[in-house]
Structure formats: C-alpha cells, structure tokens
Amino acid sequence: MFSLVRGRLRCGCRWGRIGAAPASLVAAVLLVAGAAVAANRPTLDGCVHGSATAKLVHFGSGGRLAGVALGDGRAGVVFANQSDEDLCGWLPFARATAAHGLRVLAFDYGSGAPQREVAAAAGELRRLGATRIVLVGASKGAKAAILAEAARPRLAMALVALSPERSLQGADVLPAAHRLRVPTLFVVSAHDPYSAEDTPTLAHAASRAPAHLVTVPGAAHGVDLVRDVSVATVGAAVLDFVLPGSPRRHPPSLASECGPSVAAAAPAASAVAFTAGDGAQLHGVVLGHGETTVVLAHEYPDSLCGWFPYAAELARGGTRVLAFDQRPRGTRLDLDVVAAVQKARELGAERIVAMGASLGGAATLLAAGRDCFSVSGIVSASGETDLRTYGRGVPPLYSVPFEPAIAAPVLVVGSKDDPLVDQAQVAQLLERVSSTSKRSVLVEGSEHGWDLLQGTTANDSIRDAVADFVSHAEPPVATGCR
C-alpha cells in the first residue's frame, strides 16, 4: 500500500468520497514517512545525522577527512579526538559550545599526521566562516593541537589540551610546547595513569604561551574529563576559556541588580561572568580580600542580593566573597556551585568554602557529593536534603544518594523546629557523610536559611560557628569523587 517514489512516500489508499482517513492510519503514514526520511539522511559514525543544524563536511586532501560542523559565528572551535575515540565522544560538549554562538567542528582522523589534520580542520572552519579559532584536543588530539600550533604560529588564537602525554607517534611534544605563544589551558586528573606527570611538564614548558594548568581529582583521561563527574569543573574551565570569543552578555553590576543601597555597603564589588560545566551562563559579584574565599549560593526564589548585608560583613572582616545567581530553571544547580568555586580559584583563591542557604544549601550539599571537585569546606544553612515533592517551581534536588561521597569538611547550621529540614534529617545527613570533619549547630526556634546569619533574627551561636569554620579552612580536598 505504501511505496517510496523519488524519496517521497506514496500511498495507494482510497478513503471514499466522504470523511477523512482514520486517525490511526494517518499516524501510521506519518510514522513510516518519518522513518523513511531519517533512513535517507546521511549519518556519520552512527551518532550524528546531517541536518540544518549539523552539517556533515569533507575536507583535507581529496576530501578524505570527515566531520560535523555545528553552530555559526565568527569564532570557531576545533575538537580533536583521542586515539580510542571518534567524534561522537565530543558531541554533547560540542553542542553545548555551539549553543553559545560559536562555530564548532568535530572530525575523525584519516591516515595522515594528526597535527596536519588538526590544521586542516582549522582551515575548514575558516572556509565555513570562522575568523578566530580555538583548538581543543583530548590526549592524542591535545598533542596534535600543540604540534599544529607550534608548526604554524597563529593557526589558532588559543588552545585547550586535555591530558596530553609527551610523545605522539615517536615525536617529543615538549619542544613544541616551548614554542607556543597563544593562551593555552592544560587540564589533567591528579591520578591519570597516562598524563599525571606529562601534562604539568608540558604546561610548565609553555610558560611563554601564557599557559594555565587545571588539575582535578580522580583519574579521568582525555574526553572523559568533559563527560563524566569531572565535567563539573573541567567543562566550566574549558567553556570559560573559549567563550570570551563568543557573543555573551555582560554581568550586571551589584548596583544594577540589587540597588544603590546594597551597592553602597560594598563599594568595591566587581561583577564576574562564568560558565557551568553544562554550558549554563552565570554571573556574580566579588568583594573583599583575604586568603579564604566564601562562595555564597542563595535561597529560592531570591537572588544573590539576599546575601546582603552578611556578604559585605564577611568582606569587611577579611574574607573574600563570591556571591552568585543560580540558574533560573533546571535541576543541575550543583554544577552552578562547582562553577562558582572554579571561578573563585581562577581569581586566585587557594582556600574556598562553599556555603549555601536553603535551596542554595541543598545545591551545595548535592555538589559536594555528586561532582568531583576540590573545596576547603561545605556550609549548609538549612539546606534541604530532599526537595523532590516540595512544591511547584522548586527544583527537585535530592542529595541523599550522593552524601556518602562528601569528603570535604562539613558544617550544617539551622533551627531545631525548622519545618523544611528537621533535626532527624540533619542527623541522618551527617551520619551518611564520609568526611571525618563534620558537625552541626542547631538552635532553638524555626528560623531558616540566611535569616540565621543576618538581620534581626540572626543567631550569635550560628554566626560564631560559621566564622570559626571559615577561619580554620584548610587547603582544598577532593570531594564527590566516587
């Protein structure tokens, strides 16, 4: 009854003179038609179909290299694979990158020298319309990107190298790293069995690039750094590195977001923009100076403005503060916390305490157990452990399954009669947490979140406990690394 004629579905059905086709039959026609169209679309590596948003391209000598181009814009990113992967491994992260206005090309190697094929991919991006190129490589791709840029200076405006080793097909990559002159981000896991020593060596050699080294907990290698638990930190670092070349908003000042009276209490506050590991764009304000930075996650449905005057008080007392706005929708608020911690580290902080109130506390606890990153301590001010059935609009955060992976020092503060997180839940939380440094301070009453720290309802016992915890913060430890 159905046949394909020149790529179109033809039906030899007769419906009669009166009435329409049965709904079930119409649905069947549409289903078969959709399957036929999908079957006729070109596919690459079984993971990507050619479409209006994903252009399959062939380039290089004789068109022997195949890839997929995503997005548009004048800034472009080449993604180069590691030896045991094809372009499919990059796709989720490549799509997140393209969503921010960059033109992206992921490709498969051919039979030539990998560094020449990386250069050919950069040339293809330029042919497609990109004028500024960033090379992003994993393992083999990272080494190939370093060699390509060293051989052809200004091939790219910047370079990201995930887990590069020193040798590529018998060639030592170290001399090429010495020749790098473009900003380069090196990333490696502390226990990477292949690159834990080589990547820092290459980063040190690229001292005139300038080069920045990010070391994360765990043993993830190459592209796994942007697709497993370490993506919370590495994704944030890489996206923050490449996105300045894309159209992006300017973060609002403290005065424009919170009003002149709040800004007057913190006249030296500076606005910052940063990116979560899944591509969510975030912003915040930094104020104060000090050896320890406190990252503040806000309550629902408030904003960073609600942390004042406490944030200004911390800053005046010698603590640096980064208060930020969480994403307005979605459930991955934990990634926002990790990104803010990463931003604080980029700004020079060595000791960082992540602190959240209510929903912000829930997100901070979730991050400490779900995402593999380093932090000096976690403070939860009335952070709920289970918000799955709380109410409309509230992200259904649920930290319980991840709490055994919390290895950083933890302080939980709250009220004994808080209707949102009771004494029993706090006790269960601390029992599940694996950290050897954990305690709670619960006071009489039912005050909740940041009301325990500021204003007329502030409690001296809780303020003192938090101040003591922050002042005794030690160097960061790995947490959430399962």
Image (tube, rainbow, N blue to C red):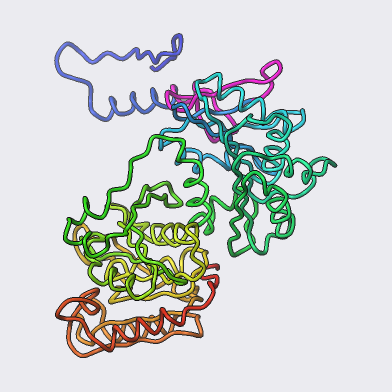
Task: In the rendered view, tell whether residue 145 sits above or below residue 125.
Answer: below
Q: Residue at x 53, y 29 (%)?
A: 132
As rendered, which of 87 and 409 lies closer to the eye?
A: 409
Query: Which percent across, then down, holds residue 232?
Result: 48, 57
As rendered, which of 243 and 397 lies closer to the eye?
A: 243
Task: In the rendered view, tell whether residue 44 sits above or below residue 476.
Answer: above
Asked if residue 244 is among those painted magenta in the image, a careful observer would answer: no
Location of the N terminus (image quadrant) = top left
Q: Residue at x 58, y 29 (%)?
A: 44
Query: Which percent across, then down, holds residue 270?
Result: 34, 55
Q: Quadrant of residue 364?
A: bottom left
409 sits left or right of 145 in the view: left
Query: Which percent across, then down, holds residue 411?
Result: 39, 81
* Count of marks overlaid on the render: 0
Q: Residue at x 60, y 36 (%)?
A: 135
Query: Which percent across, then down, holds residue 276?
Result: 42, 52
As rendered, which of 274 and 362 lies closer to the eye?
A: 274
Task: In the rendered view, tell whether residue 50 sits above or below residue 202.
Answer: above
Q: Quadrant of residue 442?
A: bottom left
Q: Which residues are magenta?
A: 37-65
Q: Residue furthest right?
A: 170
